Amino acid sequence: MIDLWWLSIPVIITLFLGLRKLNTTINNPLLKALTNPVFITITLIAILLVSFSLPYSQFASHSQLLSYLLEPAIVALALPLYQQFVHIRRNLLLIVGCCSLGIINATVVATLLSAAFNVPTQLAASVAALSVTTPITLLVTDSLGGIASLAAAMVIFIGLLGALFALLILRQVGIYNHQAQGVAIGTAFHAIGTAAALVEHPRIGAFASVAMALSALLTALIVPLLYPFLSQALL
Amino acid sequence: MDPRTVLKKIFPYLLSSCLILGCLAIAKIIMHWLQGSFPAPLLAMLMLLTLLLTNVVKEHHLAPCAKPLLNVMPLFFIPAGVGFIEHLEIIALQWQFLSAVFILVPLTSLLLIAAVISVFKGRIEHD
């Protein structure tokens, strides 16, 4: 049998860049969220592997180079974080406080649900750090002993949910303040939600990207300290 | 081409990559030494952010490699993201729990944060 695994990386790159190009041409916010290139690429590759019974371990080992590059890319996140810091100095305390509140709430609600459904500890750890962008979820979930890939998939789906319904929900409850909308969307629905917020209004998008960047930092600091305490008390 | 010109062209990239990889290497050594579970890349990100905030490192020192890396960053977590297919059995078994998490975790955070900011800044946009 011909070994085609060397095609893993070229296939990922071609699919992702092609879909991203296609996504930029779409103006409808609903359609834009549904054709998120990361979501579609992951779904297509997953369907391909499952349909042809191809082992994930082979795919993972042949696309390892991309996974290795995730670490320096996370370090490089310091740049947008620094750029956002400069712009939010005036409201820093309120935004940091609200992002922290959102992260603590997400971890507490997830752990309470884990206790209510009596799920295994590995699954409970997998949903403890969902209020953050995907690369940070991967790292934090891994450090908590959860299933990082499951957490990453959940985060992407949560982002899509936010892109579709977040602003609608906030308007339904009578919240029209751009700062409130942006910070809430950036913290709860991270990158995909932020992208949708940017399409809606640049000010909402700016606050959402600040909140998303801060959440990355705060999740890394708060969740590894909070989750062991919560899991011991509740699970 | 003159070697000096070549060096002048590649120096910003070398400096930028050295800053990123240097912080990552130091963070890995620290975490290995401390035997801690805190992710080393996040510690490296904090170190680099501190260097930027204290003006030890300037934005333009970091940008040449950081910007292209960040531009294609979603590519790097696609292999890990596909890994959920290894856990389809858990997803099928725990779909009720996962659905509850999927809806309640972001929804409560969204409403809580928006409500708190509205208390300080009002519910309506005045600008």
Image (cartoon, coloured by chain):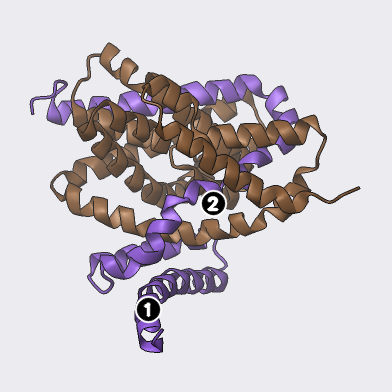
Could you tell me how many numbered marks the image carries? 2
- Look at the picture and state if A119 lies above or below A30: below
Residue A232 seen in the figure: no
Which kind of residue does numbered mark 1 sit on?
Phe
Dot 2: element: helix
Residue A213 seen in the figure: yes
Residue topped by disc 2: A139
Chain shaded purple: B
Task: Tell me: A199 left or right of A14.
Answer: left
Residue topped by disc 1: B11
On the image, the x and y values in percent for residue B22 come to: 45, 74
- Look at the picture and state if A36 lies above or below B49: above
The residue located at (16%, 43%) in the rendering is A91
Along the line of sight, which residue is nearer the eye, B40 or A165? A165
Which kind of residue does numbered mark 2 sit on?
Leu
Task: Tell me: A26 left or right of A70.
Answer: left
On the image, the x and y values in percent for residue A70 come to: 53, 56
Q: Check the image and name the residue furthest to the right.
A: A1
